[in-house]
Amino acid sequence: MTDAPTPTLPSVGREWRLLSRPVGWPEPENFELAEAEVRQPGPGQVLVRNEYLSVDPYMRGRMSAAKSYIAPFELGKAMQGGAVGEVIASAAEGIAVGDRVLHFGGWREYATFDAKQAVKVDPEAAPLSTYLGVLGMTGLTAYAGLLRTASFKEGDAVFVSGAAGAVGSQVGQIAKLKGASRVIGSAGSDEKVKILVEEYGFDAAFNYKNGPVSEQLREAAPDGIDVYFDNVGGDHLEAALGSLNQGGRIAVCGMISVYNSTEPVPGPKNLARLIATRGRIEGLVVSDHYDLQPEFVQEVGPLVASGALKYRETVVEGIENNLEAFLGVLRGENTGKMIVKL
């Protein structure tokens, strides 16, 4: 009996690199799609063929050299992001060839890294792409941001901006499932507004392009709001402050409206309302809340499986379209999580 032939491993793969730091909106010349040698795994490492890549708004901040909560992308080197893929070579205990893993070596076709940076996922329990979205980082962001940062409690009226996105859509649904008195969402198209109400169960929603946000919010929430989950900043934050009830809480997850600004953006004119309302505003970074991951999966996993918590994905095919998918997120072209399928 002869031994089975050893499968031939790839020698090169494609990866996206940041060539220069964008000023304002990112441009194609800031990036390159290049071929790179595929490293075979050393002791304790695995080699993964990526199947799904994540593109997220926070990545725009990593393209800047400004000091932030996460290190900037290095020029001339492969960028990073969430990814799910198949292990095709392993020199690590506990992870075998054929296993599917979640890791942070995205924006490339193949990734070699220490096995301790990988989390095994079950493709039988849920579609692989969901581990980048509804059951992954964006889902945990929604869960932790609403329940911990914003201290949500039953009976709260909740306003979510960017509500048709991966995070916002889950914030609104979790709030409804946990007894919110009213959930209001904003989105950038009439089609997305319809999805928020008819599919995700929001009590009200509005297209922020159809008129002043403050006026539309007052109409949608005549009794004010207790919680604002901010994905947008700018006029949305100012409107939320104007509608904030006594003891209201604001969780700032993102401010996509200012990510590509080249000049300093003035803050809300009505911050003094925090004094009158005894309100609280707090920033949110998901990495501070990974201790909630087991609780999150235990609670939200069955809701997704049963269909009680709905999700959408916008899927773009091919690594060559990774950059365009990312720019699409900044333009608000996605409904739900933006995913790149390789």
Image (spheres, rainbow, N blue to C red):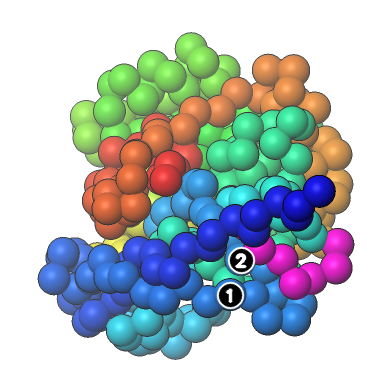
Whether residue 342 is situated above or below residue 6 in the rendered picture: above
Closest to the camera, between mark 2 and mark 1, is 1
Which type of secondary structure does the marked residue at label 1 adopt?
loop
Determine whether, in the image, residue 42 is placed left or right of residue 79: right
Question: Toward which corner of the image does residue 77 lie, by quadrant?
Answer: bottom left
Q: Is residue 85 magenta?
A: no
Question: Toward which corner of the image does residue 251 lie, by quadrant?
Answer: bottom right
Q: Nearer the viewer, residue 230 or 77?
A: 77
Task: Please state the horizontal and vertical placement of residue 103, each as a whole percent of the image.
Answer: 62, 61
Give neighbour class at mark 2: few <14, some 14-19, many 20+ (Cα, 10 Å): many
Residue under pointer 1: 40
Whether residue 47 is situated above or below residue 143 in the rendered picture: below
Q: Where does the magenta region start and end?
A: 87-94
Residue type pointed to by label 2: Leu
Furthest residue to the front? 1
Task: Please state the horizontal and vertical placement of residue 17, each as a whole percent of the image.
Answer: 32, 74
Which type of secondary structure does the marked residue at label 2 adopt?
strand
Q: Are marks 2 and 1 in contact (CB under 8 Å)?
A: yes
Residue under pointer 2: 47
Residue visible at 85% across and 39% down? 298
Determine whether, in the image, residue 315 is placed left or right of residue 189: right
The Cα atoms of the two marked residues, 2 and 1, are separated by 7 Å
Residue type pointed to by label 1: Gln
